[in-house]
Image (cartoon, coloured by chain):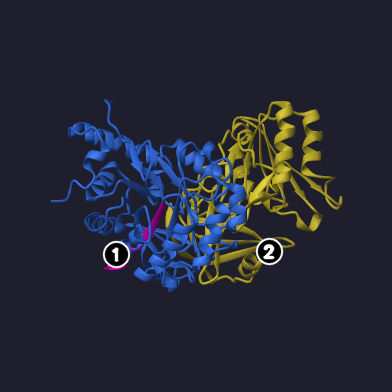
């Protein structure tokens, strides 16, 4: 393959390619992060960490359907102290590691960010947009412009690392919220979190399948919505966008980049194409770029805009 | 593979031992010994179980009464429904032409039962011989009493068979006979000892590991063991793979995702 340049500079973080493991997928242990990196990811995100340990929702927590996945894991995580012990010597992972930090109030975000500060994370992601966990994200009112501004500026005061604010696709005024995050000092927007929540009912049991009954929708069903969100955001904000939602092929990734994303998150694609989805997507991007006469991924960011 | 739970009706049940009950239901599945199903009780929870019988269109799961979920599962009657998805994971490799030993500790025997059925397809198997070792704490906990042709029992209290552990019994057998392959399932401490013992004899092992399972298809990261996902990369791992898994026999992972000493 000739010289296709997939490298990305995202908020001064050097990525060898634009694919990022999305939070909540496989990011439970350092060993799994390393394995994802070995399978071609340009960066990886840990599973979201809260102050206290959380068991999350009972099973079933994740279920697939024809057009993607429905999940209500409920932010199970070992809490900041155990997470800080788990994610030591992160240089071993081989690619930049992003910490996903959650809280029910501003002070929680501070405690988690400070608790993880001894480890070598490359950025902090704050999802203010989970649609299925009481006390967090949308169910805690964190998806409003004011709450987004407050939480982001609070985190801004306690870290010099780049801050990525992850937003929900549900909210029509996503650009207003993104601007609030930008004004508060966010360095990038991750767009988008899962949508919904949605529900899948087993008609024989006459019951919803997920134990939490509802869950966030991801995968193919989410992609057109995610692409539209990224497209709108690209016009509205100056900071870079990490496009997430239904990306499992090189064509999907290119579509997201053309909408305006500087990098792309991959989650459900790990299910549909395997843990080496990152390598496959990169190879497919290269092939397409070669066939279409492009040599740098950077050159097509926002290409779909007038 | 069934991605969303399908409901099945329990059509029979069998008391296997003190604490273990097998539930049978009709389901058409392509199943490899060692794989597992996710069993859903609506509004309660969903847990992984291996298939312990597959015959005449009937699938059986053997359930040890251990916690809230299995207690409620044990109270299910013929006609009650369960939700089933799967099968998931990578099963045992089947080498019916070699002399092999199958070592099951406690309910771990359930994961090995269909393997023994497959390795012993004919009454006069000319190709290879299968020796089964089943270990339990006491005689009342032995399962599948009359199911296999060559099953050696051991109990910790000596109430049935050899007095001692499966590892002790395997050690004894290895002094007298050779196996090309050892298949095993049980507590991870036992598995670790079996693998170490066999390593000394140059015998390849295939081991069934257990972790807390959530998605079952390799996406949530809950069942990690040194970068291997038990649900999709396993649950069966061989000696060579295990030698690269530092957590094997030492570290497990809790419901919150914390890695803790086994």
Give the extent of the magenta segment.
A163-176
Say which quarter of the image contains residue B241.
top right
Q: Is residue B190 magenta?
A: no
- Return the residue found at the far left: A306
Q: Secondary structure at mark 2?
A: loop
Disc 2 sits on a residue from what chain? B
Q: Is residue A170 magenta?
A: yes
In this rendered view, identify the residue nearer to me: B249 or B191.
B249
Residue A63: tell me if it is visible. Answer: yes
In this rendered view, identify the residue nearer to me: A261 or A78.
A261
Q: Is residue B183 above or below residue B68?
A: above
CA gap, disc 2 and disc 1: 50 Å
Q: Nearer the viewer, mark 2 or mark 1?
A: 1
Residue B149: tell me if it is visible. Answer: no
Q: Which chain is yellow?
A: B
Residue matched to label 1: A174
Disc 1 sits on a residue from what chain? A
Point out the image quarter for the N terminus of chain A.
top left
Q: Position of residue A207 (x, y in %)?
A: 44, 73
Look at 63% across and 30% down and name the residue there.
B98
Q: Secondary structure at mark 1?
A: helix
Mark 1 Cα shell of 10 Å, populated few (<14), some (14-19), many (≥20): many
Q: Position of residue A256 (x, y in %)?
A: 26, 49
Q: How many marks?
A: 2
Q: Is B172 on the left or on the right of A101, as rendered? A: right
Chain A colour?
A: blue
Q: Position of residue B146 (x, y in %)?
A: 71, 51
Look at 48% across and 71% down and name the residue there.
A134
Q: Is B24 on the left or on the right of A169, as rendered? A: right
What numbered label is drawn on residue B65?
A: 2
């Amino acid at each position: 393959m000739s010289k296709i340049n997939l490298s990305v500079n995202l908020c001064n973080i050097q990525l060898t390619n634009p694919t990022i493991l999305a939070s909540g997928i496989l990011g439970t242990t350092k060993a799994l992060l390393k394995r994802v990196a070995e399978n071609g990811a340009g960066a990886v995100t840990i599973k979201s960490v809260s102050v206290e340990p959380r068991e999350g929702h009972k099973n079933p927590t994740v279920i697939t359907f024809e057009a993607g996945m429905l999940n209500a894991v409920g932010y199970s995580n070992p809490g900041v102290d155990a997470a800080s012990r788990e994610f030591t010597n992160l240089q071993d992972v081989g690619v930049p590691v992003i910490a996903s930090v959650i809280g029910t109030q501003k002070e929680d975000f501070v405690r988690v960010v400070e608790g993880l500060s001894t480890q070598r994370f490359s950025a902090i992601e704050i999802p203010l947009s989970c649609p299925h966990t009481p006390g967090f994200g949308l169910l805690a009112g964190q998806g409003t412009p004011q709450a987004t501004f407050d939480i982001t500026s609070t985190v801004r005061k306690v870290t010099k690392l780049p801050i990525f604010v992850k937003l929900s696709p549900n909210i029509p005024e996503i650009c207003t919220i993104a601007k609030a995050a930008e004004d508060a000092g966010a360095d990038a927007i991750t767009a988008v979190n899962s949508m919904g929540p949605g529900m899948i009912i087993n008609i024989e049991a006459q019951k919803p399948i997920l134990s939490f009954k509802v869950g966030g929708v991801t995968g193919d069903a989410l992609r057109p919505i995610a692409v539209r969100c990224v497209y709108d955001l690209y016009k509205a904000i100056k900071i870079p966008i990490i496009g997430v939602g239904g990306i499992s092929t090189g064509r999907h990734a290119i579509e997201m980049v053309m909408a305006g994303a500087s990098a792309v998150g991959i989650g459900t694609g790990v299910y549909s194409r395997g843990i080496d989805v990152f390598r496959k997507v990169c190879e497919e991007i290269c092939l397409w770029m070669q066939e279409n006469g492009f040599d740098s991924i950077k050159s097509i960011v926002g290409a779909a805009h007038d | 593979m069934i991605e969303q739970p399908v409901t099945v009706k329990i059509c029979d049940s069998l008391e296997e031992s003190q604490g273990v009950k097998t539930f049978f239901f009709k389901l058409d599945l392509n199943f490899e010994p060692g794989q597992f199903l996710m069993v859903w009780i609506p509004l309660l929870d969903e847990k992984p179980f291996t298939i312990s019988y597959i015959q005449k269109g009937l699938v059986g799961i053997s359930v040890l009464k251990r916690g809230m979920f299995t207690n409620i599962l044990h109270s299910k009657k013929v006609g009650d429904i369960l939700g089933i998805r799967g099968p998931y994971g990578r099963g045992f490799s089947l080498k019916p032409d070699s002399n092999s030993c199958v070592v099951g500790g406690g309910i771990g025997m359930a994961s090995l039962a269909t393997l023994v059925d497959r390795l012993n397809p004919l009454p006069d198997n000319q190709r290879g011989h299968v020796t089964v070792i089943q270990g339990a704490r006491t005689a009342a906990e032995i399962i599948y009493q009359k199911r296999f042709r060559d099953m050696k029992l051991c109990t910790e209290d000596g109430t049935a068979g050899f007095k001692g552990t499966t590892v002790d019994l395997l050690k004894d057998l290895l002094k007298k006979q050779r196996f090309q392959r050892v298949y095993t399932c049980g507590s991870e401490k036992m598995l670790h000892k079996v693998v170490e013992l066999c390593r000394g004899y140059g015998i390849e092992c295939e081991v069934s590991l257990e972790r807390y399972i959530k998605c079952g298809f390799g996406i949530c990261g809950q069942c990690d063991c040194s970068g291997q996902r038990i649900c999709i990369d396993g649950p069966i791992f061989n000696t060579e793979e295990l030698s690269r898994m530092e957590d094997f026999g030492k570290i497990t992972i809790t419901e919150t995702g914390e890695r803790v000493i086994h």
